[in-house]
Image (spheres, rainbow, N blue to C red):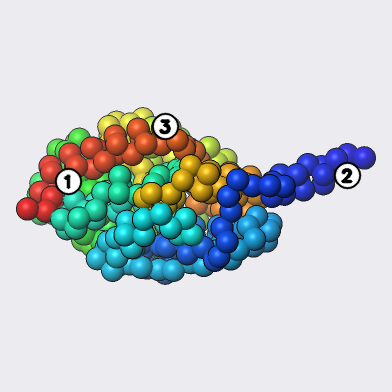
Amino acid sequence: MAVSVAAAASAALFAAPASAAWEPSKPVEFIVPAGTGGGADQMARLIQGVVVKHNLMKQPLIVVNKSGGAGAEGFLDVKNAKGDANKIVVTLSNLFTTPMATGVPFNWRDMTPVSMLALDNFVLWVNAESPHKTAKDYLAAVKAAGPGKIKMGGTGSKQEDQILTVGLEKATGAKFIYIPFKGGGEVAVQLVGNHVDSSVNNPIEAVAQWRAGKLRPLCVFDDKRMPYKAKITDTMSWSDIPTCKEAGVPTEYTMLRGIFMPPGVTNDQKQFYVDLLKKVRETPEWKDYMEKGAFNQTYMDGEAFNQWLGKAEQNHRELMKEAGFLAK
């Protein structure tokens, strides 16, 4: 009896409503404003697979990468598709950084916010052979070494990793030489090879090297520890990594993973995707993905999401202004 009740509950969870107020009548274009293989692309393709596996939508969800201009190509496509409810876009923090750094005529308010699916964490990593066991000790050593001595590896220029590095400098007085690479995987390899002294990679980008005993996590740039208690190494889980604030480094930064639509869509059209994504988040595939990537699983939609976006935009503007990254 318990099994049949559970099965019925599962079927009810994923069943489409008998008469939805609106649903797509043609394939939905799912835009990724970044290249293939990165975090945004991985998330979009996971959502696509979950929707198909659990039959959450009648029409296909087609992932399209539009990475030109640091994501501007994808965002402008959505901005210009006014009223087109058969188009959605997955966003990361280039939602804020790209228009600020390039001057491209785009702002998050030019689209329709649907929901925040999660926040991606950042971890301060050093080589496992480093003498520094805590973030406080490492940052004190960087500060003592002076400008032009210690290298921080990161993905891209004037994007999240470099902005976080600037925030770290501002909070601690340390000064890094920032070395940009094409992706987080390459950053992790460079740190293993001691070609840089530290990185601020996302958990999923450095977990293999951590598990292999090549890298050491010092702190996570979130306001609370990651909740995942499964051991990654023989002695540590994600939850064992202190927050940077705990470690005496008062710096916080997380990256948005959210969904937007074009401007000018109706409330019913937006609600369809809000409901769809809530179903996606209840699947075992999504929960497994969240744990493997050590995500912060904060969810928001509606006015709470709009308010968060406004605050995040202002925070990015202040950090980028401090760094001299704002377009003239």
Rendered residue at 69%/57% (across/down): 54
In this figure, which residue is indicated by the disc labeled 2?
Answer: 4
Question: Is residue 56 toward the left or the right of residue 44 in the image?
Answer: right
In this figure, which residue is indicated by the disc labeled 1?
Answer: 320
Number of on-image labels: 3
Give the image quarter of residue 119.
Answer: top left
Instruction: Estimate the x, y position of residue 91 in percent, counting from the top left.
Output: 38, 53
Viewer can see residue 139:
no
Question: Is residue 236 toward the left or the right of residue 247 in the image?
Answer: right
Instruction: Estimate the x, y position of residue 19 in percent, counting from the top left.
Output: 68, 47
Badge nearest the viewer, 1 or 3: 3
Amino acid type indicated by mark 1: Met
Give the image quarter of residue 128.
Answer: bottom left
Closer-to-camera residue (215/181): 181
Q: How many neighbours does mark 2 have within 10 angstroms: few (below 14), some (14-19), or many (20 or more)?
A: few
Amino acid type indicated by mark 3: Ala
Rendered residue at 36%/60% (across/down): 81
